[in-house]
Amino acid sequence: MRKRIVLKLSGEALAGENRAGINHQKVNEIASEIKALYDLGNVELGIVVGAGNIWRGRDAIESGMDRSSADYMGMLATILNALALQNSLERLGCDTRAMTSLEIPAVAEPYIRRKAISHLEKNRIVIFGGGNGIPFFTTDTTAALRSAELGAHLILMAKNGVDGVYDCDPRTNKNAVKFTKLSHLDVLEKHLNVMDMTAATLCKENNIDIIVFDMNVKGNIARAATDFSIGTLISNKI
């Protein structure tokens, strides 16, 4: 029986060392890693991608932009990333569908839950763009919501250069302590910087496990589906 999972990618991951825009070489590298997971043959895969490489809504809000406008611009940026990733995956021979919560039928299918499930059951990789389609929610929440809607019980939370969850930022504090396992309640009570609180609560209430790992280690995206020792596992069962 195949396991249905959702892979959450940050937009920054698609930028590579440029830290902004879409680096096509990096997108191709990520697509190859995703294909290795797809080729295992025992997973049904959905992907949610962020937009931080194109649009930083927080910065726009701080400069005075209306929050709703900033969030809608971010949703559009996630669609650009979804299409770039889709193209790279299809050139590798993967069967894909891009679905968006904002209706742009010329470029992608509108998100319909039953249609998405049908695609997954037909072994198509489904890439979700447009966030939730409404402002004030992050793409972390999109990953949690799509997982709950589609019956996925595992989110692969791919981090760009961080190999798990720490008690503080390991990039600024060399004494940061890494957790190997956490409960969802730990994440909420300790306010750990894994995902926003809405997303964490959705995962807790729907028994969705999360594995947080470093996507920059070759083979880790495929490995994360079964080998939780490569990062931090978050689960109600702990």
Image: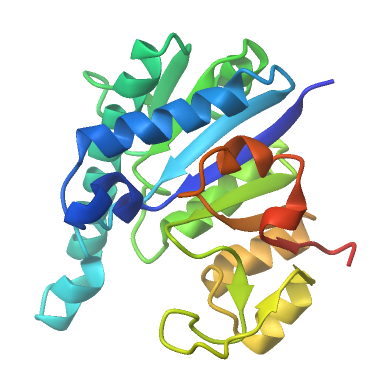
Q: Quadrant of the N terminus?
A: top right
At 75% across and 69% down in the image, what residue appears? 180
Count numbered badges in the picture: 0
Q: How is the image coloured?
A: rainbow
Q: Nearer the viewer, residue 106 or 10?
A: 10
Q: Nearer the viewer, residue 206 or 154?
A: 154
Left or right: 10 as drawn, with respect to 6 = left
Q: Quadrant of the C terminus?
A: bottom right
Relative to 101, is 211 above or below? below
At 57% across and 74% down in the image, what residue appears? 197
Residue 83 rendering spot, x and y as whole percentages: 28, 28
> Residue 138 falls in which quadrant of the image?
bottom left
Relative to 213, is 168 above or below? below
Residue 102 rendering spot, x and y as whole percentages: 31, 38
Left or right: 12 as drawn, with respect to 41 = left
Relative to 222, is 44 above or below? above
Residue 205 rendering spot, x and y as whole percentages: 76, 62
The answer to whether any part of residue 103 appears in the image is no
Left or right: 198 as drawn, with respect to 223 = left
Residue 38 rendering spot, x and y as whole percentages: 59, 22
The answer to whether any part of residue 174 appears in the image is yes
> Residue 188 falls in which quadrant of the image?
bottom right
Relative to 186, is 16 above or below? above
> Residue 176 falls in which quadrant of the image?
bottom right
At 44% across and 26% down in the image, what residue appears? 32
